[in-house]
Structures are given as C-alpha cells and as structure tokens.
Amino acid sequence: MQEKLDEIRRSVQEQLLAAGDSAQVEQIRVSVLGRKGELTALLKGMGKLSPEERPIVGQQVNALRQEIEAALAAKEAELQEKEKQARLEKEALDVSIPGKPVKVGNVHPLSSTLEKIITIFTGLGFSVVEGPEVELDHYNFELLNLPKNHPARDAQDTFYFNENILLRTHTSPVQARTMLSQKPPIRIICPGRVYRVDELDATHSPVFSQCEGLVIDEGVTMGDLKGTLDAFAQAMYGEGIQTRFRPSFFPFTEPSAEVDVTCAACKGAGCRICKGTGWIEILGAGMVNPHVLEMCGIDPERYTGFAFGIGIERVTNLKYNVPDMHLLFENDLRFLSQFGKGRV
Amino acid sequence: MLAPLSWLKQYVSIDMAPEEFARRMIMNGNAVEEVENLAAEVENVVVGKVLSVAPHANSDHLHICQVDVGQGEPIQIVTGADNMAAGDFVPVALHDSHLPGGVHIKRGKLRGEVSNGMMCSGEELGVPADVYPSNVEHGLLILREKDLVPGQDIRPVLGLDDAVLNFEILANRPDCLSMLGLAHEAAVVAGGAVQEPACDVAPAGEGTVEDLVDVSVEAPDLCRRYCAAAIRNIHIAPSPLWMRQALHKAGVRPINNVVDITNYVMLEMGQPMHAFDLDQVRGRKILVRRAKDGETIQTLDGKDRELTQNMLVIADAEGATGLAGIMGGQESEITENTKLVLFESACFDSACTRQAGRSLGMHTEAQGRFERGVNERLCRKALERALHLMQELGAGEVVPGVIDIYPEEKPLPVVRAKADYLYTLMGVEVPMETMQEILTGLGIATRVEGDELVCTSPVWRQDIVRGADIAEEVLRIYGYDHIPSTKMRKAESGRNSEHQTRDAIVRRLLCGMGAYEAATFSFIGPKWLDALRLPEDSPLRLAARLQNPLGEENSLMRTTLVPSMLNVLATNFNRGNAGAAFFEISKRFLPKALPLTELPEERPSLCIGLYGEDADFYALKGMVEALFAAFGVEDVAFQRAGDAAPWLHPGRGAAAFCGKICLGTLGEAHPDTMEAFDCKARAYVAEIDLAALESCQTYVSGVRDMPKFPAVQRDFAFVLKEETPVGDVMRCAKKAAGALCEGVQLFDIYRGQPIAEGEKSVALKVVLRAADHTLEEEEIVRVCDAVVAAVSANFGARLRS
C-alpha cells in the first residue's frame, strides 16, 4: 500500500513538473483526485482492508491527498503568476506616442490682463464698478470739467449719436455716477470698453478698454496715489519696478501726472522698447480736481482724492511685446493660441 | 508747437544742449515730442567761392568748377547745375560731408573728372525758396549775404545752427502756444529773466486811426476786446531773412512783410492778428456782430458760406465780410497794391469760435488758438509789437492812435491757498519759502500771510484760479520725484463685480471646452445685418447709428454678436487655419426706439462659433448644454429657431428655452449668410443671452446622500417616424417613468433594414432607482410598461421586435 501511495506521489510530482498551463494541472487533479482518479480509487478500495488497517491507510491517503492538493495549488499559483507576467510584458506600450488630444482654448490676452489688474486692485481694497458704454454727455464730459465746446474735448475725439448721447471716451463717467450716488470713502476701479475716433493702426484702435480708479476720502494725498501705483506696478511687472511721475494736464485732475514704470525689458538700463529712456509710459493720473468734486456734490474742503486710468491694450502690448494693435482684434488663431502656451 | 531754440534765445538765455533743455522742460511739465537738431543734420558743408566754370569735355551738360573753399588751393568740383558764374558764393559739401536726410557726400569721378564734393541746391540743404528767394528750383543756391568768407561753416549763414523743439502744449496752457509763453517756462529751466520784445512805436503824420475807420462791437459777450491800429504808405515786400527763417522753422510759410508780421506776432505772443486792406473796407466801417440766420459770405478761400445767428462776423458798411477769429473776407485781403492797412488784435469767444468752425467744417490756425483761449490782456501789447515790427521792417508809417474797445477789464485773479491744503494735495511738505520762490520764478507774485500763500496770476497766464492750480505749479517745479510713496489708511476689502465674476466663469468654461476667446469691435455695418438675412422689420435691425462713424461698415452699434463672430470664423478659415472654436463675451446694444432719446439697453451676450472637422451641430449644442449645466439651468427645451434666427440653416437651427425665457439660439449658419461673409466653410454659431441665463441660474445649495440601493437599467428600441423629435420622446419617457427615473439616455439611432423607409429605430436607456429600497421586478415592469405606453400613445411608436 505504501508503495502505491509513493508511486502516486512520484507520478504526480513528475507530471506537475512537466505541466505548462492550468489545463494540464487540472488534468492531473482529475486523474488523481477526481471521481475516477487513482487516489479516489484507493479510498474506494479501503473496504477490503482490515478494520485495524483502515484508519492508518485512511490517514495516509488523506495526508497524500492534502499534499497533492497543496502541490496542485502551488503549481496553479506559479502558473498564474507566470501568465500575468507574460501578459504584462505583452501589454507594454510605446510611452513616447502622443496622448489622446484634449482640446483646450485660452482667454484673450486683453481679458487676462484685465483679470490680473482687477485681482491686484481688489487686493488693495478697491471694488469693481461698471457703467454704460453708450453715455450721456453730462457724465462723460460735463461732470468731469469738460463743458461743451471745451478745447480739451478735442483730445478725446468722440463718437456721437446725437448732441447728448455718445460713446464714452473713458470709463470716468462711471466715477462721476459713483460720486453722485455714493458718499466717501470711495475706493473703486471701473473697467470697460471705451471709444475714440481713431482709425485702427499699429498703436490706435477706435475701440479699446480702460481700467480707471478713484479714491475719495479725508486726507488722501498724491503720495497715496504714488504708493497705490507703486504697489500696482510691482504686482503687475515684478519686484523692483518703480514709477516715475511727470507733470501733465487732465481736466479731471489737478495736479496731474503721466506715470512711467521702469522698462521691464531692460530693467531701466535703456533699450529699443523704451527708446533708450529706461521708462515706459503706462497711465495718466492725478488728484481729483476740486471743481469735479463740487459738481458731484462732494465737499472739496473736507475730501480729497485721486484718480488714474490704465489702458488695457497698452499694458497688454507692452507685457507681451505685441507689435501691432491689429493683432488684438483680428482674432487669428495663430495669434490667440500663443496665450495658451504658458502662464499669462 | 514748433519752437526754434534760436527764437526762444531772443528772450531768455539757454546755455545747454537742445536735448538737455528738452529733458528739463519735460520734467517741468512741458512735454516735448521731438527735438530736431538742424545743426546735426548738416556736417562739413562750407561757403565756397566759384573761381572758374568750364564745360566738361565728355558731357554736354556737366561743368567743371574750380572752387575756393578756404583751403589755400582751390578744389575741383563737377556739377550738373548751370546757374553759377565765377565770383558766386555757393554752399559746398566737401568730401565726407553729410546733408539732411542722411545723404553722405564723398569724393568721386564724373565722366573721368575728379569731383571733390558737391555744390548744393537749397533743396539739398532743406532751405526752401520761400525762405531764400534767390533759390531757384533747379540749380545751386547762390548766397547773397555780405561778408562771406570761403571755408566758413554754412550753418550759421543759412540759420541751420539751430534746433527745433516740438512742444506738445497741454490744454490748460494756451499761453505756451507762443514763444514768449515758452520763454517764461524756459526761464525757470535755464535760470534767468525773460527779456520782453520791443513794442515801442513812433507814429507819424496827421490825424488818428479814428479818422480812418469807425469800429464798433455789437456783441461784447463774444468779443471781449477789440484793438486796431492803422499803417499807411505801405510798401509790400518780402520780409528779411531772419524773419523768414524763423517763420519757416516754426512751420509757417513766409508770404510778404505785412502777412509775415501778423504770423510772427501770433507765434511770438500767441495773439492771432488780422490785416485788412482798409481801402477795401466799404464805408471804412468795421462792425463786430452776430450773423443773421441765412446770411451768406465768401471767405478768403473763395467759398460761399451760409451763416447762423450763433456765429460772429466782421462786417463793413455793406455786410459781413469775414468770420471773426476764423477767416477774413476776400474784399479786404492784403495784395501787392495795398497802401493802407488796419491791424486787428482781438479776443473772440472760445466756444462761439469752436461751434462756428465745427458747423462750417473749417479749421484755421487762428480759430484753433481762439478755441483754446486767447488772453484778452495781451491784445494791445501784441498790436503794438506788430506796429513796432512794421516800423523796424520799414513796411509803412504808423498812424497815431489805437482803437481799444475793452468794456470789462477784470483785475488779475488772486488765489489764497492754505499750506495744509497744498500739502495734502501734493503729498509732500514743501517749505513756505521754497513755494514762494518757485511761484515767483514762474511770474506768480506771491506773498505769505500766516499759513496761507496769496498768489496773483501773471498777466500771461489764464489757468491760475484756485488752490489746486498753485499745488500743481509748486509741485511740477519742485519735482514730482519728491512725492513720497505712501500707503493709504483704512484698508477696506475690495469686491469684484457680479458681471466680471460671471464673465470669468464663462471664459474658463468655454476655454475648457476647447474654445479660444476673441475680441471684436462693438461696431457693425448695415451690410452685416443684411448678411444675417434679417427681414426689414427685425428688431435686430433697430441699431443705434453713429453720427460720425469710421466708415459705413462701422456705423452701427451691434444688436447681436453673430456677424462679428462669423467674420472671425471667415478670417481664420480664409487664412488656412484648421478648424477651431471661438467665443466672445461682449455687449449687445438694444435701443428702445430710434433715433435714440435715452440710453439703449446694454445686454451681456456670449457668442460661440466653430468650424472645421470636429464642428457640427451637436458639438455646438454639447458646449451650450454644458454651459447651461454649469449655471444649474435644467430642463432646457430646444425648438427649431425658425424666424428667430434667419442666419441659421432652416433645418439646423434651434432656440433654447428655459420655461418661457429664451436663452439663445444655436445652429449651423445659413449658406447664404456664409457666402456673404465670403467663407466656404460650414460654420456653427450660438448666441447666448447671459442676462437671461443668469435669471435662470441655480446654485449648488448642499449635497445629497449617495444612493444606497442599486440602479436598474432597461433598454428600449422604439420604431418612430423619421420626423419625430427624439428629444420629445426622451422627455416623454422620462415623465412616464416617474419618480423612480434617474435618467433617460439616447444610445443609438438606427435607420435601414429591417426598419422601413421613413422610420428610425431609437434606442433609449432608462435608469431607475429608489432611494429607500432595492427595486422589485414588479415595480420595474410597471414603469417599463408605462414608458412604452406613453411613447406609443404620443408618438405612434412601437417597440422594435
């Protein structure tokens, strides 16, 4: 009996060694442990044994059965692992092949500039206020110290619908509307489209956008204006950027200034972009003319304020070195898509 | 304002390079657009004396000259000119010399003969014939000056040792539209006093100007001052070289002595002058009055003009002859035969001049100056200066007396400004003495009274009227660089606007869907509205029209963004760009009525456009649906757009509704529309009303529990008539499935065998789930039966077997 068992063990070991896949292992299992298997046959033949022998042989057969089952399972696991490895190997990809294209567009550079300006100024405590693009002469000019037939109106050649209705030439009418409707302290920026009678060329456009700012409070000084614009310039163009004020004139402000920032391209050393001066003019600003405060119902003895106006196209063109205004409004994909290739 | 440095130097000593002078003027608030350094353009050009002229052996038009250029030995120069003779003085550009326009002259050979430079014409040196009358059109500039020395630098001889500064004069400084005004600014920069020009006159002869002419001002509100003086025994001649050169450099063409003097004084003192031939003034009478409605005159430019009563005219005994401050009349123009001249030096109202000029479409130098404000206090002085120059030039004999009608002479404005107020505005505390010093240097007489400055405007300034003006004057001279950079008190929290926030969200959504943001003008033309195939009575044709548009194609405020977007698509397609999606967020301008009497409604709008391989109706619709979903707008019904969007393909256009609110339209553009945009691509365009979208938006208010029980899916294939809208079937199925329905999805539409012609098989997946239990088969069957029954009943559908 013992011999028979040893024979089966040896035979299974041999067959398992030779087995190459799960099917062959299964075949072995059936041939030994199956209903008609060798070991099963041995168990069936136990009845012929003496009662003394039976438990001993039974034990031996069961032990062998467990041993074979374990060997089959081990072989099965080994084969599965092998098959898995083979599959993984087969599934290897060429990772250098490009991925499935995902179409992503991008915002227009004028929008990203404006969004950035808004973020900077809301961080400085300014709130965004908007107003109509088709405006009344009253708000666009008269309340801003530009009465009818004032020669300074020539500087802002205006599109008219009729004597009183026009396309705003700046976003200042929003400031006037705010001063009339809100008591100081006022700290706002007014972004939006504005219009002037200029043919579209490399540096002009009849349609462009501005972001103007207005602060009215007790004791606001020109130093505060400079501090605010310094903070803006550094946030917009980077640390180390400075502002320079030059005297100028705007009917809305007095004293008035043209404001330059350090040329970001050459860091002030002088280059082609800044025409060798190291400075780039980016905006106009000044202390709100007391007459304007008066007209808008704010006591100029008690309150002072400042205002500034930033040209979005100018800031954009300088920041991205856009050589021609046409590009901003032509919407050629080859231009627009450049603003999606990197952070703006 | 072109200001030759040499002219400014007549009044103030400027001892620095033109570029440095310009830089300092800029930092004081006098913007300089350009410095033209005349001296730098001409180099190594000298006075030469022609010694001999001989014909060139190998040419029938060249001449060989021996020229003394002060080098001991004469030099040989070959020239094509023939207006020189031995003994003439001419400008000679020597070997290695430079002429205006970047011309470089070198030694060379002309038909075998050496030429050591070039003898120059006036044109080559930038000296026109008006300035230099001996200058002929084709030929050398023959110099007529006395005491010329061969070899001397040509620049001083021709007034080219100079620089011209082009000042950009600010609107509040009309005084700087004159050499004297600029000289006052230059004096601050250069540190010296201003030397006023000579105005002394020695009248001669019998009688006075009042005997020669009767002047009256009927409209003193529009003519605050009128000065006049007469000059007799006029001798019309060219003015002297110095005056012609000065005028030329300042951009004015020299004419004759009388006209040149009026222009010279205008440039010098800022006062426009007019000269009448007094013999031609009918009735020897000058009347300044409002025009009559419908009155006509012929102006100096020969044009007949019809006037209104808002205009001011100069009339004689017979009628209006000139437009005050704009243009004189033809009758009394100065001619070669003029013998008796009347100079007018007046102050006409700025607004009146401006309006008259605008409505007549005229723009003259004098008009521009009156519009910006002429200083009435200087009228008489300017007149006296002109008389002085008439004497100096020997152009005539000044008649005794001056007419000066000046009914309301006001004292010079005095401004009182408290130091603290000035400090607040300026942001910097400038010591009182320094402020006083600066103001005095500007000619603003200033005294200190306690903590207050008391300032009197100079006679030549008109813009010193309040404290802020004083702050500006002090600060610009003290230096804007001294303004400290300070932080504001009371930092509040700033807030973005709802509109900007919404637009930023829409932008990011559309970009994520692969679209590029475009920016187009707010203008469109009527042709673009025609291209949209809009009927005559379409509300979109109710567009506000500009009075002064940049061309017809930019004459209307757009009532829809669609044409601008189609133009963007056409541009990209025609430039060969592979297909793409674009979007724009901007405003539509919707007038309540035309012509405009009140501001139009400005409605925020989103336009999406696509073309190319990936573009089709459903790609566009998918974008629009994703946008609606992001704004929480559910249950949107898409109907055929029909008349609402005639620019769309009749079978491929839809309007989207949330309840009764129209959110917008979308679809494939009509082929006729695309043809009008000269675009051969199929294009898809949607316009979404962002205000309507916002009115329907919902917010994420909280999260729901995740489903605890499994969902069941049941698929249905309905055979439907071809024309049955699948969306309606889906909505019907969803409704019939009731509360257990989690969603209805379309997963296939099949046409062809065995489905009959004119029918389609539509496969829907219905997802069912209960929140509180696993669905029983019985429930599922009940729902499925209800779906089949409803779809069959409503659409005549049958289940595909």
Image (cartoon, coloured by chain):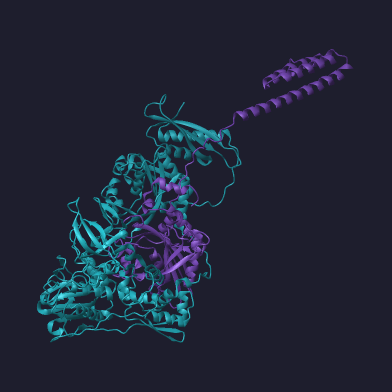
B32 to the left or right of B694: left
Viewport quadrant of the N terminus of chain B: bottom left
Q: Nearer the viewer, residue B721 or B266?
A: B266
The outermost residue toward the top is: A48
The quarter of the displayed image where residue B372 is located: bottom left
B79 to the left or right of A240: left
Judge whether A58 appears above or below A254 on screen.
above
**Could you tell me if residue A334 is visible in this image?**
yes
The quarter of the displayed image where residue B357 is located: bottom left
The residue shown at (35%, 48%) is B562
User: Where's residue A221, x and y in %?
Assistant: 47, 73
Q: Nearer the viewer, residue B722 or A269?
A: A269
**Could you tell me if residue B547 is visible in this image?**
no
The outermost residue toward the front is: B73
According to the rendering, which colour does chain B have? cyan
User: Where's residue B358, x and y in %?
Assistant: 24, 66
B596 to the left or right of B25: left
For the image shown, how many numbered marks are present on the structure?
0
Q: Nearer the viewer, residue A70 or B740?
A: A70
The outermost residue toward the right is: A52
Judge whether A260 appears above or below B15 on screen.
above
The quarter of the displayed image where residue A50 is located: top right
User: Where's residue A317, x and y in %?
Assistant: 42, 55
Q: Nearer the viewer, residue A330 or A75?
A: A330
User: Where's residue B17, x and y in %?
Assistant: 38, 69
According to the rendering, which colour does chain A have? purple
